[in-house]
Image (cartoon, helix red, strand yellow):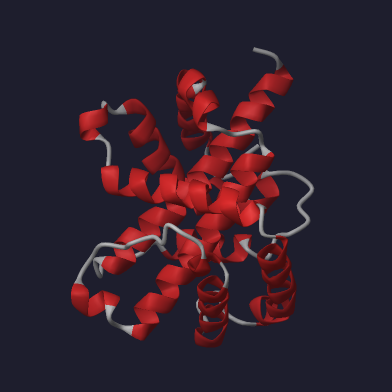
């Protein structure tokens, strides 16, 4: 495999790990489980990295993407029976929604403009600032949620009925959509995932061993 091929595989791993990280955080939120703070911040901040010089600029450090890389490695290395099918279902639905979204120029424009408007808030406030999360959640509700199929999140009914949890879940799903856009931009597809599964598993494991920075 050439250096260029390695870069392609690495970029696809980063994108797919970004998707799995977002849906894992959705799962944890819906179950009232503790979320990884760095992973949550990385997902939310990825929404505002709209002109990166490279794919790795979107998430930055391995520590920030560790949750996603670990889930990705688990999903790639396990037999179908041992994979987390709930997470797989979320990812498949996000990819389907992203393809539909890409054909709706009006919704894409709305998302782009609103993200630009929220960038200043994101830079000056904590990533989990209530106002910022509310704004991102409303953006998801007004755009992605108008498409079908809608993602049906499973979890604790008390949590899912809480407005703060709903806003966080919608924000994380928007981050998941952002990662699926990246996956598409990197040439990712279900067919390529099937044929490149071994190479992606090896690259994912290498990144997890690499230490702090994704290089």
Q: Position of residue 215 (x, y in %)?
A: 65, 37
Image quadrant holding the N terminus, namely top right
Q: Is residue 12 left or right of residue 115?
A: left
Query: What residue appears at the point 51 percent right and 68 percent down from the top-left corner?
Result: 146
Q: Position of residue 83 (x, y in %)?
A: 27, 36
Residue 133 to residue 143: above or below: below
Count the marks: how many?
0
Residue 179 to residue 109: above or below: above
Query: What residue appears at the point 62 percent right and 60 percent down from the top-left corner?
Result: 46
Q: Is residue 50 left or right of residue 23?
A: right
Q: Position of residue 33 (x, y in %)?
A: 26, 66
Image quadrant where residue 55 sits: top right
Query: What residue appears at the point 57 percent right and 70 percent down from the top-left corner?
Result: 143
Query: What residue appears at the point 51 percent right and 56 percent down from the top-left corner?
Result: 176
Q: Is residue 214 left or right of residue 69?
A: right
Image quadrant where residue 15 sits: top right
Examine the rendering and report whether any part of residue 67 can be seen: no
């Amino acid at each position: 495999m050439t250096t260029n091929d390695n870069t392609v595989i690495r970029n696809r791993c980063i994108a797919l790990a970004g998707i799995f990280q977002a849906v894992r955080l959705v799962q944890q939120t819906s179950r009232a489980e503790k979320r990884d703070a760095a992973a949550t911040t990385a997902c939310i901040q990825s929404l505002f990295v709209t002109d990166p010089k490279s794919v790795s600029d979107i998430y930055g450090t391995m520590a920030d993407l560790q949750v996603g890389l670990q889930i990705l490695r688990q999903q790639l290395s396990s037999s179908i029976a041992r994979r987390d099918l709930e997470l797989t279902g979320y990812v498949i639905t996000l990819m389907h929604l992203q393809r539909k979204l890409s054909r709706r120029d009006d919704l894409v424009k709305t998302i782009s403009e609103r993200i630009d408007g929220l960038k200043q808030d994101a830079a000056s406030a904590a990533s989990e600032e209530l106002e910022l999360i509310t704004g991102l959640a409303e953006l998801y509700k007004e755009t992605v949620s108008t498409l079908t199929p809608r993602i049906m999140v499973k979890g604790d009914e008390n949590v899912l009925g809480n407005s703060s949890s709903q806003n966080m879940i919608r924000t994380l799903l928007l981050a998941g959509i952002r990662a699926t856009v990246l996956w598409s931009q990197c040439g990712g597809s279900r067919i390529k995932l099937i044929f490149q599964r071994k190479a992606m598993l090896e690259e994912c494991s290498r990144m997890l061993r690499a230490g702090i920075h994704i290089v």
